[in-house]
Image (cartoon, rainbow, N blue to C red):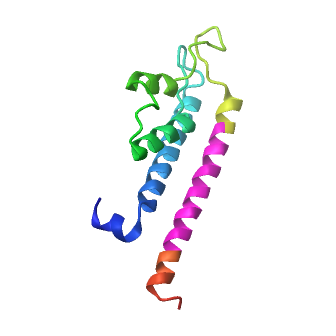
Amino acid sequence: MNILDNVFGSMPGKLENALDRATTRQSMLTRNIANVNTPGYKRADIDFNIELDDAVSRISGNKRFLSNHKDAQAQRESEATSLRLDGNNVDMEREVFAMAETELRYQTLADMANRYFSGLKNVIREGR
């Protein structure tokens, strides 16, 4: 545990990791939309529930969350079935919905980070 964790707690690191995951997911969804007409392209996504289980398990030291890294990678890529004859399985409606959901999640996390640091600033200024 480093000195900053002793002073600020683990919240900044948790917020940073959550914002990174949201950014990674948004990038993956953007790549899916960019490849909507690419024959054989399979959509990729991050399941936030699995990522959350992973993070909680690392913190608690519990190893039961995933058996190995291949299981996590399998969750990142969508099912092997295709919606079209060319083998592409990108569904624009699903991608746009997922992008909106991720944007809301990111905004919420950014607001949480802003409130956290505003509270620290208030404490440092002794409420003035």
88 above or below 75?
A: above
18 above or below 82?
A: below
User: Going by the picture, which residue comes out furthest to the top?
Assistant: 85
User: Going by the picture, which residue comes out furthest to the left?
Assistant: 2
| Label total for image | 0
77 above or below 27?
A: above
**Which quadrant of the structure image shows residue 68?**
top left
Residue 3 within the segment the image draws in magenta: no
Residue 116 within the segment the image draws in magenta: yes
Q: Nearer the viewer, residue 68 or 116?
A: 68
Which residue is pictured at 66% across the width and 44% down the height? 101
User: Going by the picture, which residue comes out furthest to the bottom?
Assistant: 128
* Segment tinted magenta in the rendering: 98-118
Which residue is pictured at 46% across the width and 61% down the height? 11
Provide residue 41's location: percent of width, then percent of height. Answer: 53, 19
Which residue is pictured at 53% across the width and 14% down the height? 40
Q: Nearer the viewer, residue 60 or 122?
A: 60
15 above or below 76?
A: below
Provide residue 43's location: percent of width, then percent of height. Answer: 55, 24
Provide residue 46's location: percent of width, then percent of height. Answer: 52, 34
**Which quadrant of the structure image shows residue 90?**
top right
Which quarter shows the N terminus?
bottom left
Asked if one can make out residue 91 in the rendered structure from this viewpoint, the answer is yes
